[in-house]
Image (spheres, rainbow, N blue to C red):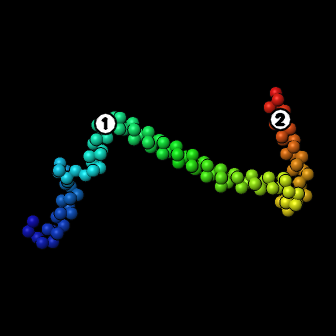
């Protein structure tokens, strides 16, 4: 390569098509050692998979609990307040409160009948 402009590009082009390993045996990283050790030890693979499953289950339980605490509990407080405090019924339900109360009573009675049978 006699041209100075081409010599500047040569390492880049050569690096794209280089199929020789870039690391010698002595330059192995910690990840390479861990990867080869993990591939050769089946017990370690099972242990790592178990740890990942436990972490996944913990994440799922945490998410469901956060959902319950942040969404369902406030809704239950509002519903309980509307049912227990008469002053809240009129602004939220308007004149339809007796109709809604009868509808809810009928639904609960039908559910109770289905449970008896």
Q: Nearer the viewer, residue 16 or 102?
A: 102
Can residue 103 be seen here? The reply is yes
The image quadrant where one finds the C terminus is top right
The image quadrant where one finds the N terminus is bottom left
Callout 2: helix, strand or loop?
helix
* Label 1: few (<14), some (14–19) or many (≥20) C-alpha neighbours in 10 Å: few
Q: Which residue is mark 1?
A: 41
* Label 2: few (<14), some (14–19) or many (≥20) C-alpha neighbours in 10 Å: few
Give coordinates of residue 65: x percent, y percent.
Answer: 61, 49
Q: Is residue 72 left or right of residue 93?
A: left
Q: Residue furthest bottom?
A: 4
Can residue 19 be seen here? The reply is no
Q: Which residue is mark 2?
A: 112
Where on the picture, by quarter, is residue 74? Answer: bottom right
Q: Nearer the viewer, mark 1 or mark 2?
A: 1
Give coordinates of residue 16: x percent, y percent.
Answer: 23, 58
**Residue at image point 57% right, 49% down:** 62
**Residue at image point 15% right, 72% down:** 5
Q: Is residue 9 left or right of residue 75?
A: left
**Residue at image point 63% right, 51% down:** 67
Q: Nearer the viewer, residue 50 or 96?
A: 50
Callout 1: helix, strand or loop?
loop
């Amino acid at each position: 390569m006699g041209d100075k402009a081409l010599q500047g590009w040569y390492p880049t082009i050569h690096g794209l098509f280089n199929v020789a390993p870039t690391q010698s045996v002595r330059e192995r990283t910690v990840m390479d050692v861990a990867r080869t050790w993990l591939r050769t030890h089946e017990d370690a693979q099972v242990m790592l998979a178990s740890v990942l499953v436990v972490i996944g289950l913990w994440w799922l339980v945490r998410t469901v609990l956060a959902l319950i605490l942040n969404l369902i509990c406030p809704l239950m407080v509002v519903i309980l307040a509307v049912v227990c405090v008469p002053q809240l019924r009129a602004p939220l339900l308007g004149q339809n409160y007796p109709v809604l109360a009868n509808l809810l009573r009928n639904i609960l009675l039908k559910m109770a009948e289905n449970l008896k049978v």
